[in-house]
Image (cartoon, rainbow, N blue to C red):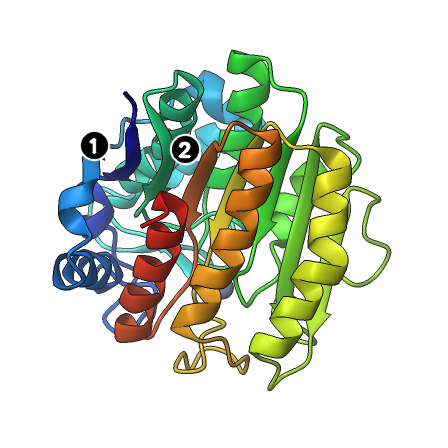
Amino acid sequence: MRMAIAFITHADCLKHEMGAHHPERPQRLTAIDDQLIASGLAPFLTRFEAPLATDEELSRVHPLDYVRAIREAAPQQGTVHLDPDTAMNRFTLDAALRAAGAAVLAVDLVMQDKVKSVFAAVRPPGHHACRARPMGFCIFNNVAVAARHAIHAHGLERVAIIDFDVHHGNGTEDIFEGDDRVIMASTFQHPFYPYSGTENPASNMFNVPLAAGAGSRELKEAVREVWLPALNDFGPELVVFSAGFDAHAEDDMAMLRFTDADYGWVTAQLKEVAERHAKGRMVSMLEGGYSLSALGRSAVQHIKAMAGV
Ligand SMILES: [Zn+2]
């Protein structure tokens, strides 16, 4: 009998820091761990350590020149900035390789039928990372590594990426636009960083921009009216989440008004899609979420809904 759900993380992801006041901070992972324990969910999760992604796995998404440039940028000490928001300390390279490696392991676990679904609590996040450009706290595009691994190593022909982070996953769109093996369904605040996702999105992108102040009602409309018809039409063999929790009402990063329960609801909708088309296979990679309490609670609702408990 396969275990219901796996949890992948790694201590290296706690050592990556971008400065004393940077919102994308190690405490995000401990906040999730704390709420898993407080909620009583922790004993139901089987924990795995994230491996380091290989150049071959990364090269399905990023040119090897880009991977090499990131390796070369990694400092021995101090901090190096890759863009105004994204920096590396001496632990960042391994953290980024583990975050992408978690995506690979997560796909292997569900495809080998060892677990039904996986949540990866890793950082740096990935959905702003473009083919050859780090951006917005992201270095390697973890969900893209997951989707391409499912296609190349496991022979899948249709993968859906679901992105409910408050920011548009411009990196994921950059990587998959025109790739008809992948569709991306997303909600995000607009107009807002990174100011993309509304001008001529590719035909495999189902983007739903939401105005500041939008909440549960608008999320549910987007899922029912746009996401679910597109997903059921496509019939994904694997559902991959870009699981950002910064659209929560308590998160100061942006101005959407999602609740803890919304994350459970949207996940339950996608669980139905996964069970109908994908043998229940779901892989979820942490993206944003900067209010520590709301992040931990929302992640618990998301993981509970994936596990069906
Ligand atoms: Zn975000």
Horizontal placement of 181 versus 257: left or right? right
Where's the N terminus, which quadrant?
top left
Q: Quadrant of residue 51?
A: top left
Q: Element at badge 2? A: helix
Give the CA separation, mark 2 to mark 1: 11 Å
Q: Does label 1 point to a residue whose CB lies under 8 Å from ligand 1?
A: no
Q: Which residue is mark 2?
A: 103
Q: Quadrant of residue 133?
A: top right
Q: Nearer the viewer, residue 104 or 21?
A: 104
Can residue 135 be seen by looking at this rendering?
no
| Residue found 62% across the figure and 69% down from its top | 219
N-terminal-most mark, 2 or 1: 1
Q: Is residue 147 above or below residue 296?
A: above
Q: Is residue 308 above or below residue 255?
A: above
In percent of width and height, residue 202 lies at 82, 46
Horizontal placement of 10 versus 235: left or right? left
Q: Does label 2 point to a residue whose CB lies under 8 Å from ligand 1?
A: no
Report the amino acid beneath label 2. Answer: Ala
Q: Element at badge 1? A: strand
| Residue found 36% across the figure and 37% down from its top | 118
In percent of width and height, residue 224 lies at 70, 60
Horizontal placement of 36 versus 113: left or right? left
Q: Which residue is mark 1?
A: 49
Q: Nearer the viewer, residue 164 or 23?
A: 164
Q: Nearer the viewer, residue 70 or 235?
A: 235
Task: Give the residue furthest to the bottom.
Answer: 213
Report the amino acid beneath label 1. Answer: Glu
In percent of width and height, residue 86 lies at 42, 58
Q: Is residue 290 above or below residue 74?
A: below
- Crowdedness near tag 2: few (<14), some (14–19) or many (≥20) residues, C-alpha within 10 Å: many
- Crowdedness near tag 1: few (<14), some (14–19) or many (≥20) residues, C-alpha within 10 Å: some
In percent of width and height, residue 262 lies at 48, 68
